[in-house]
Image (cartoon, helix red, strand yellow):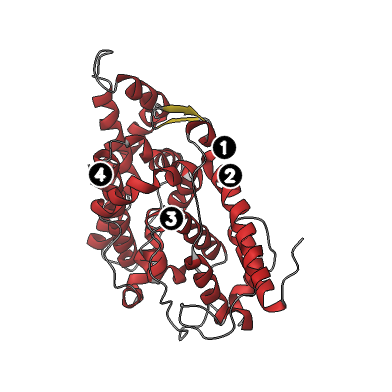
Amino acid sequence: MITVRERDYELVLLARAVVGAGSAQAAALLRTPRASGRVGKGGQQGPGLSPLGVQALERTFGVGIVRALARGGGARKEHLGGRSGRLWERHAAPKLAVTELPVEVLQWCLAEPLGLVSRAPCTVHAATEPADIAVVYLLARLLVAEGLGHVLEEEVFAANPLVHLAFADRLAAARRTGGERRTTGANPSTADAFTAFLRRGALLVEAFAAWLATDILRADQPAASVSDAIAISARRRATYEAWLLACERSGRLDLALPLVDAAVAAMRKPAPPVLDEGASLRDRAEAARGGNVMCEVVLRLTRHLDVLGTLDFFDDGYAEAVALRARWARLEAARPVAEARTLAAAGV
């Protein structure tokens, strides 16, 4: 047991909540100003962490990230990257060292209530190290779960590739409410940016595949208005297209697994309705067509299955193609639903 100073205590509590170690106080911490949060390069001034506080955070992240990787999908037996088994059976133990960046973001979260419209922007730059990317994604999941998804407009979240894939709908909504003023970096939803990320972060995608699929599926919800539905669908479509293209370029089409799982599950649900009855028929029709984002994902992925089915046993990549077709077999059952919904939205 490590005894820390009071001003470090809340930071450690929030870190535990982020990595899933549990903290019923997370909601209150994120909505109440705390003196322990007024530190770091995120735009706040104040005392730094004590040595024992640093030690407690290092232990929290060291154990918590590994557990999160297992719970997020790493414990499932999969055939990914040409290897079968659970994450730790497919890969050697990765070096996931957390830098100061996640700590600075947590400190910024605690400095002022996150519900304040006028709170200072986060000046922490986007994460580039795999462990930092993972922690920022886990923090984003906590913020969304606590009803604070608007915070994802901040650059450190919006430029995170996992956050962008999982919460494209939230980022689109933030832009419509003026959130674009927060972001100044390159759009991380481009295929080039995703491709660059997959060179170093493929293991994170494998590990968080289940949680990413859950987050993507939750985005397939009815919007409050036709204009919101159109804008959100456009952002989601661009993001998923870019991700699939990056998987193709990287030779890791298996990393489309989160989209596969989310798209198949979406075909089992009723199509999300357009709720704005006051909109014109033309706008409602456009929103209905735009709302078929997951149908488009299903149809595109099944076309890949068709191509993979043409490979013979002597072709390069045949073994991987067989494994991929077996893992994605559920797409075949989802294809008729996707086709029917697409035709219905087009008025055919």
Residue on which the image places disc 3: 221
Q: Is residue 131 left or right of residue 191?
A: right
Task: Check the picture and name the quadrant holding the N terminus.
Answer: bottom right
Label 4 element class: helix
Q: Is residue 291 left or right of residue 117?
A: left
- Residue 252: x and y, percent? 32, 36
Q: Dot 2, how many residues are within 10 Å of its Cα: few (below 14), some (14-19), or many (20+)? A: some
- Disc 4 versus disc 1: distance between alpha carbons? 27 Å
- Labels 3, 4: front one: 4
The kind of residue tagged 4 is: Leu
- Disc 2 versus disc 3: distance between alpha carbons? 25 Å
The kind of residue tagged 2 is: Arg
CB-based contact (under 8 Å), mark 4 and mark 1: no
Label 3 element class: loop
Residue on which the image places disc 2: 71
- Is 92 in front, or is 347? 92
The answer, for residue 12, to whether it is visible in the render is: yes
Numbered label tally: 4
Name which quarter of the figure residue 224 lies in: bottom left
The kind of residue tagged 1 is: Ala
- Labels 4, 1: front one: 1
- Disc 2 versus disc 4: distance between alpha carbons? 27 Å
The answer, for residue 341, to whether it is visible in the render is: no
Q: Dot 4, how many residues are within 10 Å of its Cα: few (below 14), some (14-19), or many (20+)? A: some
Label 2 element class: helix
Label 1 element class: loop
- Going 33% across and 45% down the picture, which residue do you hit? 199
CB-based contact (under 8 Å), mark 2 and mark 4: no
Which numbered disc covers residue 245?
Answer: 4
The kind of residue tagged 3 is: Gln
Task: Check the picture and name the quadrant holding the C terminus.
Answer: top left
